[in-house]
Image (cartoon, grey):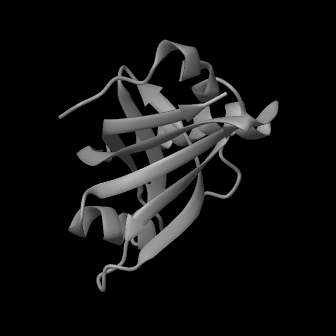
Amino acid sequence: MSQSIPEKYRDLFTKRAFGSLATLMPDGSPQVTPVWVDLDGDLVVVNTAKGRQKDKNMRRDPRVAIAIIDPDNPYRYIEIRGRVAEIVEQGADAHIDKMAKKYLGVDKYPYRQASETRVMFKIKPEHTNTMG
């Protein structure tokens, strides 16, 4: 079952609001990482480097949760539970530069390593919970 991001909370994806991404470790325990977040239609987009723990976890088990707190009002947030619908490498370098512009105010992602391959995980929301 899929669910759209409520219109009232879509602005969180245009602000410098960080997401807390929860993935599942091989033993089923949760792993949480702060991430930059974006929207592609109704899909939530997270960009990472191949080989990182969240990359491994989402490839193995597509179930995730993300909490995004409004930086202007910490009592306003959206929690999204869903599944990875797409894993995309093409365009991921340009996307991380777009995110660097939004979150850091720079044109190029400054922490890129020559050896890394960027990848986008597009997450289909199945349940949302909001406050504020």
In the depicted structure, whether residue 129 falls above or below residue 12: below
Q: Position of residue 93 (x, y in %)?
A: 48, 43
Compare residues 35 and 10 and report the one nearer the observer. Answer: 10
Name the outermost residue toward the top: 7
Kindly indicate the quadrant of the structure image that contains residue 82. top left
Compare residues 79 and 51 and report the one nearer the observer. Answer: 79
Which image quarter is the N terminus in? top left
In the depicted structure, whether residue 91 falls above or below residue 42: below
Q: Position of residue 83 (x, y in %)?
A: 27, 48
Compare residues 59 and 100 and report the one nearer the observer. Answer: 59
Name the outermost residue toward the left: 1
Q: How many circles with numbers are drawn on the protein?
A: 0
Residue at 43% across / 38% down in the picture?
Answer: 45
Kindly indicate the quadrant of the structure image that contains residue 24. bottom left
Q: Position of residue 120 (x, y in %)?
A: 38, 46
In the depicted structure, whether residue 90 falls above or below residue 110: above
Residue at 32% across / 47% down in the picture?
Answer: 89
Compare residues 59 and 126 and report the one nearer the observer. Answer: 126
Q: Is residue 42 left or right of residue 115?
A: left
Residue at 67% across / 27% down in the picture?
Answer: 132
Kindly indicate the quadrant of the structure image that contains residue 127. top left
Q: Confirm whether residue 22 shows in the render.
A: yes
Q: Is residue 14 left or right of residue 52?
A: right
Q: Confirm whether residue 52 shows in the render.
A: no
Residue at 46% across / 19% down in the picture?
Answer: 6
Q: Position of residue 104 (x, y in %)?
A: 77, 40
In the depicted structure, whether residue 29 falls above or below residue 105: below
